[in-house]
Image (cartoon, rainbow, N blue to C red):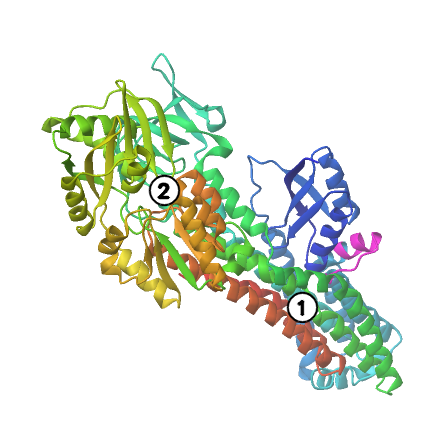
Amino acid sequence: MTVAELDLAIEGMTCASCVARVEKKLGRLDGVTASVNLATERARVSYPADLDPAALIAAVETAGYGATLIEPDAPAPAVSRGGGLRIRLLVSAALTVPIVLLAMVPAWQFWGWQWVSLVLATPVVLWGGWPFHRSTLVNLRHGAATMDTLVTLGTAAASLWSVGALVFGTAGELGMRHAFTLVAEPGAASGAVYFEVAAGVTTFLLLGRFIEERSKRRAGAALRDLLEAAAKHVTRLEPDGAETLVPIEALAVGDLFVVRPGEKIATDGTVVDGTAAVDASAMTGESVPVEVAQGDAVAGGTIALGGSLVVRATRVGRDTQLARMGAIVEQAQLGKAGIQRLADRISSIFVPIVIGLAVATFAIWMLAGGGTSAALSASIAVLIVACPCALGLATPTALLVGTGRASQLGILITGPEVLERVGRIDTVVFDKTGTLTTGRMSVDSVATAAGADAVEIVRLAAAVERGSEHPIGRAVARAASDNASDGLGSAPAVTGFRAIAGFGVTGTVEGRAVVVGRPDDVLRMLGTALDADLATAIEGIRASGATVVLVGVDGRVLAALSVSDPLRPDAVLAVSRIRSLGLEPMVLSGDHAATVRAVLAPLGIRNAIGGATPAGKAEEVVRLQGEGRIVAMVGDGVNDAAALAQADLGIAIGSGSDIAIEAGDLTLLRSDPVLVADAIRLSRATVRVIRGNLFWAFAYNVAALPIAALGLLNPMIAGAAMAFSSVFVVLNSLRLRRAV
């Protein structure tokens, strides 16, 4: 069965019970699974490819919620109801303040003040609280109960009781006493009115939801900023040289487009003319612009400064780096941690339990002789205080902020399960080349066998390495053109090119079989040995910390190339920060052990293994895991893909190969090893916030429900506390914006 995926925008969800209901309804369809996110109001749905998406929308609607399909190329922006909520909140607050003051300040009470309270409270409860009541009615038609059901029941009970007491004449004579007793002893007056409770709870809940909506929007700001970095129009260069302004959707792979100073680069491409400094801070977090010129790759969404460019589009639409980044961040924000799934399951049965507890509270108070007013006050407090909304927001808001902050730093996290794994990591294994070293290699010297011509050998080696993507291969390929003035000449055409991961390359140049690669592998392939001069030269190269590359021609080893790759300036800081997190750094490299030791000496890494093949790196990770270690692997090349996939946590350097990035769980968009520690620290902080949110959300309900049931909590205070619990979860999550 072929499985497809899509995203739905869900309307009408207010708490974790809503999330569980939507997931349950979608899950009843054959072959359908769904993950619903309360903070982003979206659902990621996996379904059989032959199922009409309309059936998914219909299933959501039968649950009492709205759903619309989100097109893959047009991610839906975060929904904000702040404008409508603000008006309801302001009007409700203006009407509620005098109601509360009349009830609480005896000196301000006058004959008939309860009737004035009724007039003022009615629009607050009916109009101000309509978002809650509407959701209650919709869910009631489908036999469901949510947080809004509790709000409607609580405010309705307070209002109806008060109207009854007022109409039947008991409230007037007891109103003065009620003003003194409501806070100290909720419900002490048997005929007291509760208009201030109904209006106050409604206003507090509106305030809480308004703050929550604004905070959620702030939480999702990083993703919106990322997605909005894309250009909307582009100046396309037509074949006749004319310039045409077209929508970005009209640009195709291979088209030429013009980028002027200060403009966004419309899509991924290669510079064919011009020079400029490119600001990529919106995507990678790198604050220093990078100079680009003909032949350099540029990414869509970055900004050209101080120069004009003509760029040939290489990727458009969903294939661009910016779009892929947005998709990864969105996918991470839609996910759920394992502990959140438990919270959702609890929330799905929480509301019916609370309603039953409220009924039991009323009955027990009546049987104990506490009086109708006291029983009603306690049961209303139970209904109001028990909202599971905070449980539903605990994980998604933390993910929203944490992954958004990560994207600002140039870190892409694929999902919440990755964050949970980060907390268990105790060993970080680095690849050397391009990770701890600059990856910008250069050929320093050439040692040749007796009678061999260095100029000719480098020319042949450069020819076969021209098709290689490895940093060493690129360095060898550059040697012919960069040193043309020294007589090395240019690289001729090659046929039969073959790249072997962890070994090197082979090919035929001008009828001669050429092999370039690691010494042991080249010698094994050719079935020969080194002459004494080359063996001595190789020992000297390794002792200097350079990498040795052998060149064999027609079955004979003719030269040893010295290829240097210095440590990154920030490598020492990166390893120091890894240690400060309580983690052990290690290195796995394909270079000879002597070269690895020489290069890494300033880092003080005790466990550094050289001569590792791609399979050997993965095997070493397995060995470490067999010792009980939880391993993170950091790499950037094809050679690292197997180890990245095998590790408990794969961290791919974004400047590396697509294969490495696909194999990784975390992707660093800058070749900056310090980001490894930042990624781990931010991931740990996000998990801590998620757990803290869930703890306080559970603790709040565990502590508040018994207090309310015992009649020790004023219903209006219960409403304020319930609203604050959700606001607290969101505000606590927003701390992650400053975590790193």
Residue 465, x across and y down, in percent: 29, 30
Which of the 4 image quarters holds residue 585?
A: bottom left
Image point 29% across, 31% down: which residue?
A: 515
Which three-letter amino acid code belongs to the residue tagged 1? Thr
Seen in the image, is 501 located left or right of residue 112? left
Of pointers 2 and 1, the one earlier in the residue sequence: 1
> Considering only vertical position in the picture, is 377 above or below 667?
below
Residue 230, x across and y down, in percent: 44, 37
Seen in the image, is 519 located left or right of residue 64? left
* Residue beneath disc 2: 655
Q: Nearer the viewer, residue 585 or 580?
A: 585
The overriding secondary structure of the stretch rendered in magenta is helix
**Of circles 2 and 1, which is in front?**
2
> Considering only vertical position in the picture, is 46 above or below 629?
above
Residue 680, x across and y down, in percent: 43, 59
Residue 276, x across and y down, in percent: 26, 34
Q: Magenta span covers which residues? A: 135-147
* Residue beneath disc 1: 96
The numbered mark at residue 509 is none
Which three-letter amino acid code belongs to the residue tagged 2? Ser
Q: Nearer the viewer, residue 153 or 455?
A: 455
Image point 43% across, 43% down: which residue?
A: 660
Image point 29% across, 42% down: which residue?
A: 520
Circle 2 residues within 10 Å: few <14, some 14–19, many ≥20: some
Residue 569 seen anywhere in this rendered image of the structure:
no
